[in-house]
Image (spheres, grey):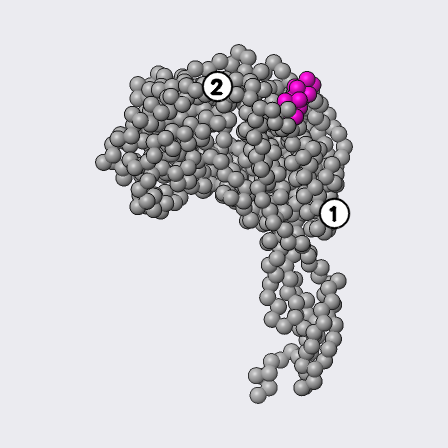
Protein backbone atom coordinates (compact mmCIF):
# COMPACT_ATOMS: atom_id res chain seq x y z
CA UNK A 1 0.00 0.00 0.00
CA UNK A 2 1.44 3.35 -1.02
CA UNK A 3 0.17 6.48 0.76
CA UNK A 4 0.79 9.88 -0.84
CA UNK A 5 0.01 13.15 0.93
CA UNK A 6 -1.13 15.83 -1.50
CA UNK A 7 -2.87 19.15 -1.52
CA UNK A 8 -5.72 19.85 -3.92
CA UNK A 9 -7.47 23.15 -4.48
CA UNK A 10 -11.26 23.22 -4.66
CA UNK A 11 -13.20 26.48 -4.65
CA UNK A 12 -10.15 28.45 -3.62
CA UNK A 13 -9.56 26.26 -0.53
CA UNK A 14 -6.53 24.01 -0.05
CA UNK A 15 -7.57 20.56 1.16
CA UNK A 16 -4.95 18.20 2.52
CA UNK A 17 -5.80 14.55 2.19
CA UNK A 18 -4.26 11.09 1.92
CA UNK A 19 -4.31 9.03 -1.25
CA UNK A 20 -3.99 5.31 -0.76
CA UNK A 21 -2.84 3.36 -3.80
CA UNK A 22 -3.43 -0.36 -3.87
CA UNK A 23 -0.70 -0.88 -6.49
CA UNK A 24 2.62 -1.79 -4.92
CA UNK A 25 5.55 -0.87 -7.12
CA UNK A 26 8.93 -2.49 -6.52
CA UNK A 27 11.57 -0.29 -4.93
CA UNK A 28 15.09 -1.37 -5.84
CA UNK A 29 18.39 -0.38 -4.36
CA UNK A 30 20.61 1.02 -7.11
CA UNK A 31 23.74 -0.98 -7.75
CA UNK A 32 26.42 -1.17 -10.36
CA UNK A 33 26.98 -4.23 -12.49
CA UNK A 34 30.23 -5.42 -14.02
CA UNK A 35 31.25 -8.36 -16.15
CA UNK A 36 32.60 -11.36 -14.28
CA UNK A 37 36.41 -11.50 -14.45
CA UNK A 38 37.87 -14.32 -16.55
CA UNK A 39 40.37 -16.38 -14.57
CA UNK A 40 43.84 -16.95 -16.07
CA UNK A 41 44.59 -20.59 -15.10
CA UNK A 42 48.32 -20.01 -15.17
CA UNK A 43 50.67 -22.70 -13.91
CA UNK A 44 50.64 -22.70 -10.10
CA UNK A 45 47.40 -20.73 -9.76
CA UNK A 46 44.73 -21.74 -7.25
CA UNK A 47 42.00 -21.89 -9.92
CA UNK A 48 44.09 -24.24 -12.06
CA UNK A 49 44.66 -26.64 -9.18
CA UNK A 50 40.99 -26.55 -8.21
CA UNK A 51 39.85 -27.20 -11.78
CA UNK A 52 42.32 -30.06 -12.29
CA UNK A 53 41.00 -31.75 -9.15
CA UNK A 54 37.38 -31.24 -10.23
CA UNK A 55 38.12 -32.68 -13.69
CA UNK A 56 39.37 -35.87 -12.03
CA UNK A 57 36.32 -36.10 -9.77
CA UNK A 58 33.86 -35.53 -12.60
CA UNK A 59 35.57 -37.98 -14.96
CA UNK A 60 35.65 -40.71 -12.34
CA UNK A 61 31.88 -41.23 -12.20
CA UNK A 62 28.87 -41.54 -14.47
CA UNK A 63 26.38 -39.23 -12.82
CA UNK A 64 22.71 -40.19 -12.96
CA UNK A 65 20.48 -37.34 -14.12
CA UNK A 66 16.72 -37.81 -13.74
CA UNK A 67 13.86 -35.91 -15.32
CA UNK A 68 12.66 -33.44 -12.66
CA UNK A 69 9.09 -32.15 -12.63
CA UNK A 70 7.87 -30.14 -9.67
CA UNK A 71 10.63 -31.56 -7.51
CA UNK A 72 9.79 -35.18 -8.43
CA UNK A 73 12.56 -37.31 -9.95
CA UNK A 74 11.33 -39.41 -12.88
CA UNK A 75 13.14 -42.08 -14.92
CA UNK A 76 11.28 -42.92 -18.13
CA UNK A 77 12.30 -45.89 -20.26
CA UNK A 78 15.80 -47.09 -21.03
CA UNK A 79 18.76 -45.02 -19.84
CA UNK A 80 20.91 -43.03 -22.25
CA UNK A 81 24.43 -41.74 -21.84
CA UNK A 82 26.37 -38.55 -22.41
CA UNK A 83 29.94 -39.36 -23.44
CA UNK A 84 33.12 -37.35 -23.66
CA UNK A 85 33.51 -36.24 -27.31
CA UNK A 86 37.32 -36.43 -27.09
CA UNK A 87 37.14 -39.94 -25.61
CA UNK A 88 33.76 -41.34 -26.57
CA UNK A 89 34.21 -44.64 -24.72
CA UNK A 90 33.86 -42.74 -21.44
CA UNK A 91 30.42 -41.91 -20.06
CA UNK A 92 29.90 -38.95 -17.75
CA UNK A 93 26.11 -38.87 -17.40
CA UNK A 94 23.23 -41.33 -17.42
CA UNK A 95 19.88 -39.79 -18.28
CA UNK A 96 16.36 -40.53 -19.52
CA UNK A 97 13.98 -39.26 -22.18
CA UNK A 98 10.62 -37.96 -21.03
CA UNK A 99 7.64 -39.66 -22.68
CA UNK A 100 4.76 -37.68 -24.14
CA UNK A 101 2.76 -38.36 -20.98
CA UNK A 102 5.60 -37.09 -18.80
CA UNK A 103 5.96 -33.94 -20.92
CA UNK A 104 2.23 -33.30 -20.54
CA UNK A 105 2.65 -33.66 -16.79
CA UNK A 106 5.47 -31.12 -16.88
CA UNK A 107 3.22 -28.71 -18.79
CA UNK A 108 0.51 -28.93 -16.10
CA UNK A 109 3.03 -28.44 -13.30
CA UNK A 110 4.57 -25.43 -15.08
CA UNK A 111 1.22 -23.78 -15.75
CA UNK A 112 0.09 -24.25 -12.14
CA UNK A 113 3.42 -23.05 -10.77
CA UNK A 114 3.42 -19.97 -13.00
CA UNK A 115 0.23 -18.63 -11.41
CA UNK A 116 1.86 -18.83 -7.96
CA UNK A 117 5.31 -17.67 -9.02
CA UNK A 118 4.00 -14.60 -10.82
CA UNK A 119 2.73 -13.33 -7.46
CA UNK A 120 6.18 -13.60 -5.92
CA UNK A 121 7.57 -10.07 -5.45
CA UNK A 122 10.27 -9.05 -7.89
CA UNK A 123 12.58 -8.34 -4.97
CA UNK A 124 12.41 -11.99 -3.89
CA UNK A 125 13.08 -13.25 -7.42
CA UNK A 126 16.06 -10.95 -7.77
CA UNK A 127 17.48 -12.18 -4.46
CA UNK A 128 17.39 -15.77 -5.76
CA UNK A 129 19.11 -14.80 -9.02
CA UNK A 130 21.83 -12.83 -7.26
CA UNK A 131 22.39 -15.71 -4.87
CA UNK A 132 22.69 -18.10 -7.83
CA UNK A 133 25.22 -15.86 -9.57
CA UNK A 134 27.34 -15.80 -6.42
CA UNK A 135 27.20 -19.61 -6.19
CA UNK A 136 28.24 -19.90 -9.84
CA UNK A 137 31.12 -17.48 -9.33
CA UNK A 138 32.30 -19.19 -6.17
CA UNK A 139 31.54 -22.64 -4.82
CA UNK A 140 30.29 -24.13 -8.11
CA UNK A 141 32.52 -22.41 -10.66
CA UNK A 142 34.87 -25.32 -11.32
CA UNK A 143 32.05 -27.87 -11.19
CA UNK A 144 30.40 -25.98 -14.05
CA UNK A 145 33.69 -25.70 -15.93
CA UNK A 146 34.62 -29.36 -15.47
CA UNK A 147 31.21 -30.58 -16.67
CA UNK A 148 31.47 -28.28 -19.70
CA UNK A 149 35.04 -29.30 -20.56
CA UNK A 150 34.43 -33.03 -20.28
CA UNK A 151 30.89 -33.15 -21.63
CA UNK A 152 31.17 -30.60 -24.44
CA UNK A 153 34.90 -30.95 -25.12
CA UNK A 154 35.91 -27.37 -24.40
CA UNK A 155 39.39 -26.12 -23.60
CA UNK A 156 40.01 -24.40 -20.27
CA UNK A 157 39.58 -20.88 -21.60
CA UNK A 158 36.54 -21.75 -23.71
CA UNK A 159 34.83 -23.25 -20.66
CA UNK A 160 35.80 -20.33 -18.41
CA UNK A 161 34.37 -17.69 -20.75
CA UNK A 162 31.18 -19.74 -21.14
CA UNK A 163 30.12 -21.78 -18.12
CA UNK A 164 31.64 -19.33 -15.66
CA UNK A 165 31.86 -15.74 -16.95
CA UNK A 166 29.01 -15.59 -19.46
CA UNK A 167 26.60 -17.64 -17.37
CA UNK A 168 27.23 -15.44 -14.33
CA UNK A 169 26.90 -12.32 -16.49
CA UNK A 170 23.52 -13.44 -17.82
CA UNK A 171 22.18 -13.83 -14.30
CA UNK A 172 23.59 -10.55 -12.97
CA UNK A 173 22.92 -8.39 -16.00
CA UNK A 174 19.36 -9.64 -16.51
CA UNK A 175 18.64 -8.66 -12.90
CA UNK A 176 20.16 -5.26 -13.64
CA UNK A 177 18.19 -4.82 -16.87
CA UNK A 178 14.96 -5.80 -15.13
CA UNK A 179 15.60 -3.19 -12.43
CA UNK A 180 16.38 -0.53 -15.00
CA UNK A 181 13.30 -1.34 -17.09
CA UNK A 182 11.10 -1.26 -13.99
CA UNK A 183 12.17 2.33 -13.26
CA UNK A 184 9.89 3.61 -16.01
CA UNK A 185 6.44 4.51 -14.84
CA UNK A 186 3.78 6.26 -16.94
CA UNK A 187 2.96 9.95 -16.57
CA UNK A 188 0.49 10.88 -13.85
CA UNK A 189 -0.44 14.48 -14.66
CA UNK A 190 -2.12 15.08 -11.33
CA UNK A 191 -1.43 12.25 -8.84
CA UNK A 192 -4.05 13.72 -6.47
CA UNK A 193 -6.66 12.73 -9.03
CA UNK A 194 -5.19 9.84 -11.03
CA UNK A 195 -2.16 7.63 -10.61
CA UNK A 196 -0.89 5.60 -13.56
CA UNK A 197 1.45 2.65 -13.19
CA UNK A 198 2.90 -0.25 -15.12
CA UNK A 199 3.72 -3.69 -13.84
CA UNK A 200 5.36 -6.73 -15.38
CA UNK A 201 3.46 -10.02 -15.53
CA UNK A 202 4.58 -13.44 -16.65
CA UNK A 203 2.95 -15.00 -19.70
CA UNK A 204 -0.21 -16.97 -19.09
CA UNK A 205 0.83 -20.58 -19.71
CA UNK A 206 4.30 -22.09 -20.04
CA UNK A 207 7.54 -21.40 -21.88
CA UNK A 208 9.43 -24.17 -23.67
CA UNK A 209 13.19 -23.58 -23.48
CA UNK A 210 15.13 -25.65 -26.02
CA UNK A 211 18.86 -25.16 -25.55
CA UNK A 212 21.93 -26.16 -27.60
CA UNK A 213 25.12 -28.04 -26.78
CA UNK A 214 27.67 -25.38 -27.63
CA UNK A 215 27.22 -22.91 -24.77
CA UNK A 216 26.38 -23.89 -21.22
CA UNK A 217 25.51 -20.24 -20.58
CA UNK A 218 22.86 -20.26 -23.31
CA UNK A 219 21.08 -23.11 -21.54
CA UNK A 220 20.96 -21.10 -18.33
CA UNK A 221 19.76 -17.99 -20.13
CA UNK A 222 17.08 -19.71 -22.21
CA UNK A 223 15.54 -21.48 -19.22
CA UNK A 224 15.93 -18.96 -16.43
CA UNK A 225 15.40 -15.54 -17.98
CA UNK A 226 11.73 -16.35 -18.69
CA UNK A 227 11.50 -17.68 -15.12
CA UNK A 228 12.95 -14.43 -13.76
CA UNK A 229 10.09 -12.57 -15.43
CA UNK A 230 7.41 -14.69 -13.76
CA UNK A 231 7.02 -17.62 -16.15
CA UNK A 232 6.82 -21.38 -15.74
CA UNK A 233 9.34 -23.23 -17.91
CA UNK A 234 9.89 -26.64 -19.49
CA UNK A 235 13.63 -26.90 -20.10
CA UNK A 236 14.72 -29.39 -22.74
CA UNK A 237 18.53 -29.46 -22.48
CA UNK A 238 20.73 -30.77 -25.27
CA UNK A 239 21.70 -34.42 -24.86
CA UNK A 240 25.34 -33.43 -25.37
CA UNK A 241 25.31 -30.65 -22.75
CA UNK A 242 23.28 -32.55 -20.20
CA UNK A 243 25.68 -32.62 -17.25
CA UNK A 244 26.58 -28.93 -17.32
CA UNK A 245 22.92 -28.00 -17.67
CA UNK A 246 22.08 -30.29 -14.74
CA UNK A 247 24.65 -28.37 -12.70
CA UNK A 248 22.80 -25.11 -13.42
CA UNK A 249 19.44 -26.65 -12.52
CA UNK A 250 20.74 -27.74 -9.12
CA UNK A 251 22.47 -24.42 -8.43
CA UNK A 252 19.13 -22.68 -8.94
CA UNK A 253 17.48 -25.05 -6.49
CA UNK A 254 20.21 -24.34 -3.96
CA UNK A 255 19.75 -20.61 -4.55
CA UNK A 256 16.12 -20.92 -3.48
CA UNK A 257 14.04 -21.28 -6.66
CA UNK A 258 10.84 -23.16 -5.76
CA UNK A 259 10.10 -26.51 -7.39
CA UNK A 260 8.02 -26.50 -10.56
CA UNK A 261 9.06 -23.09 -11.87
CA UNK A 262 11.69 -24.64 -14.15
CA UNK A 263 11.23 -28.32 -14.94
CA UNK A 264 14.17 -30.34 -16.28
CA UNK A 265 12.87 -32.41 -19.19
CA UNK A 266 15.39 -34.19 -21.44
CA UNK A 267 13.43 -35.63 -24.34
CA UNK A 268 13.46 -36.80 -27.92
CA UNK A 269 13.27 -33.65 -30.04
CA UNK A 270 10.26 -34.48 -32.22
CA UNK A 271 8.29 -35.88 -29.27
CA UNK A 272 8.96 -32.75 -27.22
CA UNK A 273 8.14 -30.49 -30.16
CA UNK A 274 4.85 -32.20 -30.98
CA UNK A 275 3.72 -32.21 -27.35
CA UNK A 276 4.46 -28.58 -26.55
CA UNK A 277 3.03 -27.19 -29.78
CA UNK A 278 -0.21 -29.13 -29.35
CA UNK A 279 -0.84 -27.74 -25.85
CA UNK A 280 -3.28 -24.82 -25.59
CA UNK A 281 -1.12 -23.46 -22.76
CA UNK A 282 1.96 -22.82 -24.90
CA UNK A 283 2.92 -19.17 -24.30
CA UNK A 284 6.38 -19.08 -25.83
CA UNK A 285 9.35 -20.96 -27.24
CA UNK A 286 12.89 -19.91 -26.38
CA UNK A 287 15.12 -21.70 -28.85
CA UNK A 288 18.71 -21.94 -30.01
CA UNK A 289 19.51 -24.50 -32.69
CA UNK A 290 19.13 -25.24 -36.37
CA UNK A 291 17.01 -23.43 -38.96
CA UNK A 292 15.02 -26.58 -39.95
CA UNK A 293 14.05 -27.24 -36.32
CA UNK A 294 13.00 -23.65 -35.65
CA UNK A 295 11.07 -23.56 -38.93
CA UNK A 296 9.27 -26.76 -37.93
CA UNK A 297 8.32 -25.30 -34.56
CA UNK A 298 7.09 -22.08 -36.15
CA UNK A 299 5.07 -24.07 -38.70
CA UNK A 300 3.44 -26.21 -36.00
CA UNK A 301 2.53 -23.14 -33.96
CA UNK A 302 0.93 -21.66 -37.06
CA UNK A 303 -1.10 -24.82 -37.67
CA UNK A 304 -2.32 -24.87 -34.08
CA UNK A 305 -2.95 -21.15 -33.66
CA UNK A 306 -6.67 -21.51 -33.08
CA UNK A 307 -6.20 -23.74 -30.04
CA UNK A 308 -3.89 -21.47 -28.04
CA UNK A 309 -4.92 -19.17 -25.20
CA UNK A 310 -2.22 -16.69 -26.29
CA UNK A 311 -0.27 -15.94 -29.41
CA UNK A 312 2.90 -17.86 -28.48
CA UNK A 313 6.09 -15.83 -28.57
CA UNK A 314 8.77 -17.42 -30.72
CA UNK A 315 12.34 -16.41 -29.95
CA UNK A 316 15.05 -18.20 -31.91
CA UNK A 317 18.76 -18.01 -32.66
CA UNK A 318 19.70 -20.26 -35.55
CA UNK A 319 23.36 -19.85 -36.41
CA UNK A 320 25.04 -18.23 -39.36
CA UNK A 321 27.52 -18.24 -42.22
CA UNK A 322 29.74 -15.63 -40.67
CA UNK A 323 32.30 -13.69 -42.67
CA UNK A 324 35.57 -11.79 -42.47
CA UNK A 325 35.86 -9.28 -45.30
CA UNK A 326 39.40 -8.06 -45.88
CA UNK A 327 40.11 -4.70 -47.50
CA UNK A 328 43.48 -4.11 -49.24
CA UNK A 329 44.39 -1.66 -46.45
CA UNK A 330 43.94 -4.26 -43.68
CA UNK A 331 46.57 -5.17 -41.08
CA UNK A 332 47.62 -8.68 -42.11
CA UNK A 333 48.69 -9.85 -38.66
CA UNK A 334 45.38 -8.74 -37.14
CA UNK A 335 43.49 -10.55 -39.92
CA UNK A 336 45.42 -13.77 -39.41
CA UNK A 337 45.18 -13.83 -35.62
CA UNK A 338 41.52 -12.86 -35.54
CA UNK A 339 40.53 -15.34 -38.24
CA UNK A 340 42.35 -18.28 -36.65
CA UNK A 341 40.67 -17.64 -33.33
CA UNK A 342 37.24 -17.03 -34.81
CA UNK A 343 37.29 -20.03 -37.15
CA UNK A 344 38.93 -22.65 -34.93
CA UNK A 345 38.30 -21.91 -31.26
CA UNK A 346 35.95 -24.57 -29.95
CA UNK A 347 36.32 -26.32 -33.30
CA UNK A 348 34.27 -23.67 -35.08
CA UNK A 349 31.17 -24.77 -33.13
CA UNK A 350 30.13 -21.26 -32.20
CA UNK A 351 27.11 -19.68 -33.85
CA UNK A 352 29.36 -16.69 -34.56
CA UNK A 353 32.44 -18.55 -35.88
CA UNK A 354 34.01 -17.26 -39.09
CA UNK A 355 33.63 -19.83 -41.85
CA UNK A 356 34.09 -17.70 -44.98
CA UNK A 357 36.52 -14.92 -45.78
CA UNK A 358 37.03 -12.59 -48.72
CA UNK A 359 40.68 -11.73 -49.38
CA UNK A 360 42.07 -9.18 -51.88
CA UNK A 361 44.65 -10.51 -54.32
CA UNK A 362 47.19 -7.95 -53.09
CA UNK A 363 47.20 -9.50 -49.59
CA UNK A 364 46.57 -13.09 -50.60
CA UNK A 365 50.08 -14.51 -50.20
CA UNK A 366 50.74 -12.81 -46.88
CA UNK A 367 47.39 -13.86 -45.41
CA UNK A 368 47.58 -17.38 -46.80
CA UNK A 369 51.06 -17.98 -45.42
CA UNK A 370 50.09 -16.47 -42.10
CA UNK A 371 47.03 -18.69 -41.77
CA UNK A 372 48.96 -21.82 -42.72
CA UNK A 373 51.75 -21.01 -40.31
CA UNK A 374 49.42 -20.37 -37.39
CA UNK A 375 47.25 -23.40 -38.16
CA UNK A 376 50.34 -25.62 -37.93
CA UNK A 377 50.92 -24.48 -34.34
CA UNK A 378 47.46 -25.43 -33.08
CA UNK A 379 47.45 -28.38 -30.70
CA UNK A 380 44.30 -30.50 -30.82
CA UNK A 381 43.69 -33.09 -28.11
CA UNK A 382 42.25 -34.03 -24.72
CA UNK A 383 40.70 -31.19 -22.71
CA UNK A 384 42.66 -32.12 -19.58
CA UNK A 385 45.81 -31.02 -21.40
CA UNK A 386 45.93 -27.30 -20.67
CA UNK A 387 48.13 -26.67 -23.72
CA UNK A 388 45.52 -27.60 -26.33
CA UNK A 389 43.90 -24.98 -28.53
CA UNK A 390 40.78 -27.06 -29.14
CA UNK A 391 39.54 -30.62 -28.72
CA UNK A 392 36.92 -32.76 -30.47
CA UNK A 393 33.67 -31.92 -32.24
CA UNK A 394 30.57 -32.72 -30.26
CA UNK A 395 29.39 -36.13 -31.53
CA UNK A 396 29.31 -38.69 -34.34
CA UNK A 397 26.65 -36.79 -36.29
CA UNK A 398 28.71 -33.60 -36.28
CA UNK A 399 31.83 -35.57 -37.20
CA UNK A 400 30.07 -37.14 -40.19
CA UNK A 401 28.62 -33.83 -41.37
CA UNK A 402 31.88 -31.85 -41.09
CA UNK A 403 34.09 -34.51 -42.63
CA UNK A 404 31.57 -34.86 -45.45
CA UNK A 405 32.24 -31.24 -46.45
CA UNK A 406 35.98 -31.86 -46.31
CA UNK A 407 35.71 -35.00 -48.44
CA UNK A 408 33.63 -33.15 -51.02
CA UNK A 409 36.13 -30.30 -51.09
CA UNK A 410 38.96 -32.72 -51.85
CA UNK A 411 37.05 -34.01 -54.87
CA UNK A 412 36.07 -30.58 -56.21
CA UNK A 413 38.61 -29.05 -58.64
CA UNK A 414 37.41 -25.55 -57.68
CA UNK A 415 38.59 -26.10 -54.12
CA UNK A 416 42.09 -26.53 -52.71
CA UNK A 417 42.99 -27.67 -49.20
CA UNK A 418 45.62 -25.26 -47.88
CA UNK A 419 45.94 -26.74 -44.39
CA UNK A 420 44.38 -29.50 -42.33
CA UNK A 421 41.86 -31.80 -43.98
CA UNK A 422 42.63 -34.75 -41.71
CA UNK A 423 40.27 -36.34 -39.21
CA UNK A 424 40.07 -39.40 -36.96
CA UNK A 425 37.01 -40.56 -35.05
CA UNK A 426 38.42 -43.77 -33.58
CA UNK A 427 38.92 -42.49 -30.02
CA UNK A 428 37.45 -39.01 -30.10
CA UNK A 429 35.69 -37.00 -32.78
CA UNK A 430 38.79 -35.13 -33.90
CA UNK A 431 38.82 -32.94 -37.01
CA UNK A 432 41.94 -30.93 -37.77
CA UNK A 433 41.42 -27.19 -38.37
CA UNK A 434 40.96 -27.01 -42.14
CA UNK A 435 41.60 -24.07 -44.45
CA UNK A 436 40.27 -24.27 -48.02
CA UNK A 437 40.64 -21.92 -50.94
CA UNK A 438 37.83 -21.81 -53.48
CA UNK A 439 37.51 -20.16 -56.87
CA UNK A 440 33.72 -20.23 -56.62
CA UNK A 441 32.19 -17.66 -54.23
CA UNK A 442 28.90 -19.56 -54.38
CA UNK A 443 30.35 -22.97 -53.55
CA UNK A 444 28.48 -24.62 -50.68
CA UNK A 445 31.56 -24.10 -48.53
CA UNK A 446 30.88 -20.35 -48.84
CA UNK A 447 27.12 -20.49 -48.41
CA UNK A 448 26.11 -23.36 -46.11
CA UNK A 449 26.57 -23.52 -42.35
CA UNK A 450 29.05 -26.28 -41.54
CA UNK A 451 29.41 -25.70 -37.80
CA UNK A 452 32.89 -27.12 -37.58
CA UNK A 453 36.58 -26.22 -37.96
CA UNK A 454 36.41 -25.46 -41.68
CA UNK A 455 37.38 -22.03 -43.06
CA UNK A 456 36.97 -21.24 -46.76
CA UNK A 457 38.72 -18.34 -48.46
CA UNK A 458 37.70 -16.64 -51.69
CA UNK A 459 40.28 -14.38 -53.35
CA UNK A 460 39.02 -11.34 -55.25
CA UNK A 461 40.85 -8.98 -57.55
CA UNK A 462 41.41 -5.63 -55.89
CA UNK A 463 39.65 -3.87 -58.75
CA UNK A 464 36.57 -6.02 -58.12
CA UNK A 465 36.16 -4.90 -54.52
CA UNK A 466 32.58 -3.71 -55.12
CA UNK A 467 31.56 -7.07 -56.56
CA UNK A 468 33.18 -8.91 -53.67
CA UNK A 469 31.43 -6.68 -51.14
CA UNK A 470 28.09 -7.40 -52.80
CA UNK A 471 28.69 -11.16 -52.36
CA UNK A 472 28.68 -10.86 -48.57
CA UNK A 473 24.96 -10.19 -48.25
CA UNK A 474 23.70 -11.98 -51.34
CA UNK A 475 25.38 -15.39 -50.99
CA UNK A 476 23.63 -16.82 -47.93
CA UNK A 477 20.33 -16.70 -46.07
CA UNK A 478 22.08 -15.93 -42.77
CA UNK A 479 22.89 -12.63 -41.09
CA UNK A 480 24.40 -13.34 -37.68
CA UNK A 481 27.95 -11.98 -37.36
CA UNK A 482 30.48 -10.42 -39.69
CA UNK A 483 33.75 -8.52 -39.55
CA UNK A 484 35.50 -6.03 -41.80
CA UNK A 485 39.25 -5.45 -41.58
CA UNK A 486 40.61 -2.18 -42.98
CA UNK A 487 42.76 0.79 -42.05
CA UNK A 488 40.93 2.90 -44.62
CA UNK A 489 38.30 4.70 -42.50
CA UNK A 490 36.37 5.84 -45.56
CA UNK A 491 35.89 2.22 -46.56
CA UNK A 492 34.92 1.25 -43.01
CA UNK A 493 32.19 3.89 -43.07
CA UNK A 494 30.99 2.60 -46.41
CA UNK A 495 31.01 -1.02 -45.23
CA UNK A 496 29.10 -0.04 -42.10
CA UNK A 497 26.21 1.09 -44.30
CA UNK A 498 26.41 -1.37 -47.21
CA UNK A 499 26.70 -4.40 -44.92
CA UNK A 500 24.13 -3.10 -42.46
CA UNK A 501 21.70 -5.99 -42.92
CA UNK A 502 24.31 -8.76 -43.23
CA UNK A 503 25.01 -9.17 -39.52
CA UNK A 504 23.27 -8.60 -36.23
CA UNK A 505 26.68 -8.36 -34.57
CA UNK A 506 29.10 -6.40 -36.74
CA UNK A 507 32.80 -5.98 -36.02
CA UNK A 508 35.30 -3.47 -37.36
CA UNK A 509 38.91 -4.69 -37.17
CA UNK A 510 38.01 -7.49 -34.79
CA UNK A 511 37.01 -11.12 -35.12
CA UNK A 512 33.40 -12.19 -35.56
CA UNK A 513 33.26 -14.10 -32.26
CA UNK A 514 33.48 -13.11 -28.62
CA UNK A 515 30.37 -11.11 -27.80
CA UNK A 516 30.14 -10.25 -24.11
CA UNK A 517 26.95 -9.84 -22.09
CA UNK A 518 26.20 -6.15 -21.60
CA UNK A 519 28.83 -5.15 -24.17
CA UNK A 520 27.69 -6.71 -27.46
CA UNK A 521 24.09 -7.95 -27.09
CA UNK A 522 23.86 -10.97 -29.37
CA UNK A 523 21.55 -12.03 -32.20
CA UNK A 524 21.09 -11.87 -35.94
CA UNK A 525 18.41 -11.38 -38.55
CA UNK A 526 17.25 -13.12 -41.71
CA UNK A 527 17.46 -16.89 -41.17
CA UNK A 528 19.89 -16.43 -38.28
CA UNK A 529 16.99 -15.77 -35.94
CA UNK A 530 14.61 -13.28 -34.41
CA UNK A 531 17.42 -11.00 -33.15
CA UNK A 532 16.11 -10.49 -29.64
CA UNK A 533 19.60 -9.55 -28.43
CA UNK A 534 20.40 -11.81 -25.48
CA UNK A 535 22.72 -9.98 -23.13
CA UNK A 536 20.95 -6.65 -23.70
CA UNK A 537 18.18 -4.72 -21.93
CA UNK A 538 15.38 -5.70 -24.35
CA UNK A 539 15.71 -9.46 -23.91
CA UNK A 540 14.02 -9.65 -20.50
CA UNK A 541 11.06 -7.70 -21.89
CA UNK A 542 10.29 -10.46 -24.37
CA UNK A 543 9.19 -12.61 -21.43
CA UNK A 544 6.69 -10.30 -19.82
CA UNK A 545 3.20 -9.11 -20.71
CA UNK A 546 3.03 -5.67 -19.08
CA UNK A 547 -0.14 -4.36 -17.50
CA UNK A 548 -1.07 -0.66 -17.43
CA UNK A 549 -3.07 0.38 -14.35
CA UNK A 550 -5.03 3.60 -13.81
CA UNK A 551 -6.21 4.43 -10.28
CA UNK A 552 -8.65 7.30 -9.81
CA UNK A 553 -9.02 8.90 -6.37
CA UNK A 554 -11.60 11.61 -7.17
CA UNK A 555 -15.01 10.15 -8.03
CA UNK A 556 -16.55 11.08 -11.35
CA UNK A 557 -19.79 13.02 -10.77
CA UNK A 558 -20.62 14.52 -14.15
CA UNK A 559 -21.68 12.85 -17.36
CA UNK A 560 -21.74 15.88 -19.60
CA UNK A 561 -18.82 18.19 -20.38
CA UNK A 562 -18.44 21.88 -19.42
CA UNK A 563 -18.73 23.16 -23.00
CA UNK A 564 -22.10 21.48 -23.26
CA UNK A 565 -23.44 23.80 -20.56
CA UNK A 566 -22.49 27.05 -22.31
Q: Is residue 370 visible?
A: yes
Residue 443 placement, left or right of 463: right
The structure residue drawn at horizontal position 60% and vertical position 53%, both measured from the top left corner, is: 180
Residue 360 placement, left or right of 430: left
Residue at which label 2 appears: 379
What kind of element bears circle 1?
helix
Quadrant (top left/top right/bottom left/bottom right) for the C terminus: bottom right
Q: Position of residue 40 (x, y in %)?
A: 56, 30
The dot on residue 116 is 1
Alpha carbon separation for disc pair 2 and 1: 52 Å
Residue sitting nearer the eye, 563 or 120 = 120
Whether the magenta-drawn stretch holds residue 364 is answered as: no
Judged from this view, the residue extending furthest toward the front is: 44
Q: Position of residue 78 (x, y in %)?
A: 69, 20
Point out the stretch of residues depicted in magenta.
Answer: 50-62
Circle 2 Cα neighbour tier, 10 Å, few/some/many (<14 / 14–19 / ≥20): some
Residue 163 placement, left or right of 452: right
The structure residue drawn at horizontal position 57% and vertical position 34%, both measured from the top left corner, is: 38
Up the image or down, 171 lies above or below 457; here it is below
The structure residue drawn at horizontal position 62% and vertical position 31%, both measured from the top left corner, is: 237
Amino acid sequence: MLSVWTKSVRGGRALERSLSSIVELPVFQDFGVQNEPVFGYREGSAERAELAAELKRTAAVTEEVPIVIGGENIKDGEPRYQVMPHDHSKKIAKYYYASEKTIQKAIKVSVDAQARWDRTPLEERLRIWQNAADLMAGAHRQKLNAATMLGQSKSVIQAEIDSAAELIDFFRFNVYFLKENAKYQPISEDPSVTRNSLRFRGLDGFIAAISPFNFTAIGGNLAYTPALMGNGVLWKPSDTALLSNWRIFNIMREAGLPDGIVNFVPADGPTFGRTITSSPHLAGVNFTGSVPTFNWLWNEVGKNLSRYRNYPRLIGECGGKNYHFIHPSADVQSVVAGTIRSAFEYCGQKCSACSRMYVPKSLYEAIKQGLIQEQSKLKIGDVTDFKIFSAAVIDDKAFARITGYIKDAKKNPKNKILAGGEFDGSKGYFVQPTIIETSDPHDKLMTEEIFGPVLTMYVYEDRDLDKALALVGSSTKFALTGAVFAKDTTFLQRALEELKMTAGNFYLNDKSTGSVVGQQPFGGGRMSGTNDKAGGPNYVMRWTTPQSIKETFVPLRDIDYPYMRD
